[in-house]
Amino acid sequence: MEILSFLLSLFTHTLLLNFSIFHFPSISAHRTNHGDFLRCLSRRINDFTVETRVIHTSKDSSFFSILNSSIQNPRFSVLETPKPVSIITPVQATDVQSTIICARLHGVHVRTRSGGHDYEGFSYIAKNRPFVVLDLRNLRSITLDVDNRTGWVQTGATLGELYYEIGKSSKSLAFPAGLFPTVGVGGQFAGGGYGTLMRKYGLAADNVIDAHIVDASGRFLDRQGMGEDLFWAIRGGGGSSFCVVLSWKIRLVEVPSTVTVFKVEKTSEKEAVSVINKWQYVADKVPDDLFIRAMLQRSNETAVYASFPGLYLGPVSYLLALMEEKFPELGLEIGDCREVSWIESVLWFVNEESIDDLRKRKRTSRSFKGKDDFIQKPIPRTAIRELWRRFYAPEARLAKIILTPFGGKMSEIAEYEIPFPHREGNVYEIQYLAYWKEEEDKNKTDTEKYMRWVKSVYDFMTPYVSDSPRGAYVNFRDIDLGIYGLGMNMKKTKYEVGKIWGVKYFKNNFDRLVDGAWKDTECRADLGWYFFNTDSPDKLMGTYNLRRGISPLQSELEALIWAMQCMIRHNKLVMVFQTDCSDVVKMVSKPEEWPAFSTLLDEVDRCKRRFTSFNIMHIPRTNNTKADKLAQSARDLPTDVYYVNSISPVWIPELL
Ligand SMILES: Cc1cc2nc3c(=O)[nH]c(=O)nc-3n(C[C@H](O)[C@H](O)[C@H](O)COP(=O)(O)OP(=O)(O)OC[C@H]3O[C@@H](n4cnc5c(N)ncnc54)[C@H](O)[C@@H]3O)c2cc1C
């Protein structure tokens, strides 16, 4: 007789929720779950025509074109980059729910992608584990309620598509998000989202008033359903951290029907350094209707220049008077300015001509690496001069340094209002970006020089920027700040490791993101099972820790399903399952009496039908010591565990 005893141990220890910032490694990944995942998904979709639109495996001819079409940092298009085993492109919310439920049941990791602009490719790369990409490109509807100045935007939409709809509907409404039209609203609002209206209205995330999400258990929830703690976390806590956001409800903001865009350029080093120096003293203090950026870059092989593009929420005459008073050193003249509508200002900032261009989904051919800092007091002229000189390096040919002014509304919102903490006290944010042509990615040593350039500028800036912690913007994700991965210090807990970079992105909000609001509901479920045959020396064992379900019984059923799947995979089809949870035995025997668990019980039933003989019985916990030890061992490890083998894991050699 073949027997498997399994045990689930639910344990309330602090869990770092973020799938992307906190990149969970697997200790052992003997997973062949992809097939089961696909079968589960296909059963749930249950419509062949829909299925072909939604599921794309690497065997499909369209697979790579879908994958690459929104890789917006081509350095991650190269062969060595880990590829997903399939891409799921949901056409309705239930497809997202099914993806999450099936992925959870079958131990498949999910990366969610909206616009694909993640600086480090986190929406389509996962190292060391099989994963699927949940690409939201088909969920992009936008509905605006101009009278109430609100709107719902699905997270597969781009900023350009949102701006297009707003521009078409009204001349006096806008939304304060980023500048670049192909960026997705899914990733951007989840990390904050700033643009030309930030000094007047704050971040995109400051203007989100409701959301629809699918949580880790596959539930569809709105703001009321998810509760204020989760709603707080998804507005700035970083994409992919807590759930899949399906749509945001946004508050539209008022803008005058005529605004003014302008740009001034300075080509002499002396003048540029002097004007940037003055900019540092005024850009965060001028009225919040005025946004002036400063940028450094090269115009050709030899020349460097500074530019000052800006937006004023009013007519040119007011702007000129204001600049004369506050910032005459810039030398703004009427010829540098253009009166336009707000939607035209959006086009102007990205050098586009027609409003239809905002809806174009283009893939970039430039690879990049970025890092950023927050500046809390003006840096000395000598430092500005050094930044200028760094552009003479050959690898700075396409580089940019961008200074974005804070102040205004950004300083009025408290640090803890949403997870984005960089508020009062920040004069500006500075980004160091190196770009290169995609073709150069073929040779890694060629591209490393660009990375080194960015790193050296970042190192040079150390004395001048925020410290304790040295702040960073989560939307400009920087893997150098730290990441979960192989080689991490196993003596430290996930919390301790994650805190190294977590406080840089979130300052004091990090603790609330990690455990404050989550302790009670988001804990680990540690599973263990031990298989033996009464007539042979055959043995197998497994241990796995996964995010705890919404109730202990849900996790108990998930433990059973996992154990059943492992047995099916090992062709052990005449089985007696033993558990110390009597409710599981009751549920499996009379599923109709447990309607709240029907989804999982259906899955149990489907698995059951694959056994030639299936029995389940209750045993006391004292008879379940091996499974107990396996489950506990998963609990004690600081990393993700997925272990199935015939020999004991190295961390519990005494098991057999
Ligand atoms: C060219 C360029 C210009 C930029 N300009 C600005 C700017 O002006 N202002 C600014 O603030 N930022 C800007 N950014 C940064 C940008 O906001 C972030 O990179 C943002 O995360 C990108 O969102 P995305 O949806 O395009 O990216 P994706 O790569 O699709 O997603 C980014 C992250 O969010 C997660 N995610 C995506 N969709 C969802 C979802 N629906 N639910 C849960 N998680 C999700 C992903 O898994 C990933 O971790 C720019 C970036 C680039 C490359």
Image: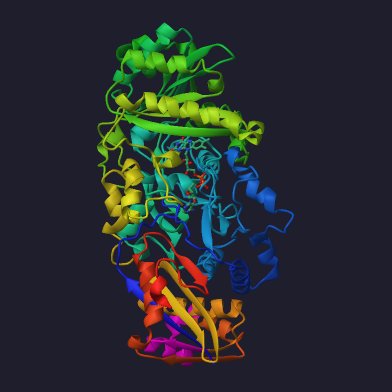
Q: Main secondary structure of the magenta part?
A: helix
Figure colour scheme: rainbow
- Residue 595 magenta-highlighted: yes
Q: Is residue 340 visible?
A: no
Q: Give the vertical position of 630 relative to 636 (above or below).
A: below
49 part of magenta stretch: no
The correct choice, above or below, for 230 with respect to 339 in the image is below
Please state which of residues 229 and 60 is positioned toward the viewer in this rendering. Answer: 60
Highlighted magenta segment, given as a residue range? 576-600
* Residue depicted at x 54% and y 33%: 368
Q: Is residue 599 left or right of residue 32?
A: left
- Quarter holding the C terminus? bottom left
At 66% from the left edge and 66% from the top edge, which residue is drawn?
A: 51
Where residue 608 appears, as percent x and y from the top left, is 56, 86
- In this view, the residue farthest toward the right is 61
Q: Residue at x 64, y 31 (%)?
A: 440
In the rendered image, the vertical position of residue 531 relative to residue 181, given as above or below: below
- Give how far across and how far down residue 376 sits, in percent: 28, 28
Side (left or right) of 539 relative to 492: right
For the question of whether residue 454 can be seen, the reply is yes
Q: Quadrant of the N terminus?
A: bottom right
Q: Could you tell me how many numbered marks the image carries? A: 0
Residue 380: percent from left, percent from top: 31, 16
Q: Position of residue 499 (x, y in %)?
A: 32, 48
Of residues 379 and 225, the one drawn nearer to the viewer in this rendering:
379
Q: Is residue 25 above or below residue 543?
A: above
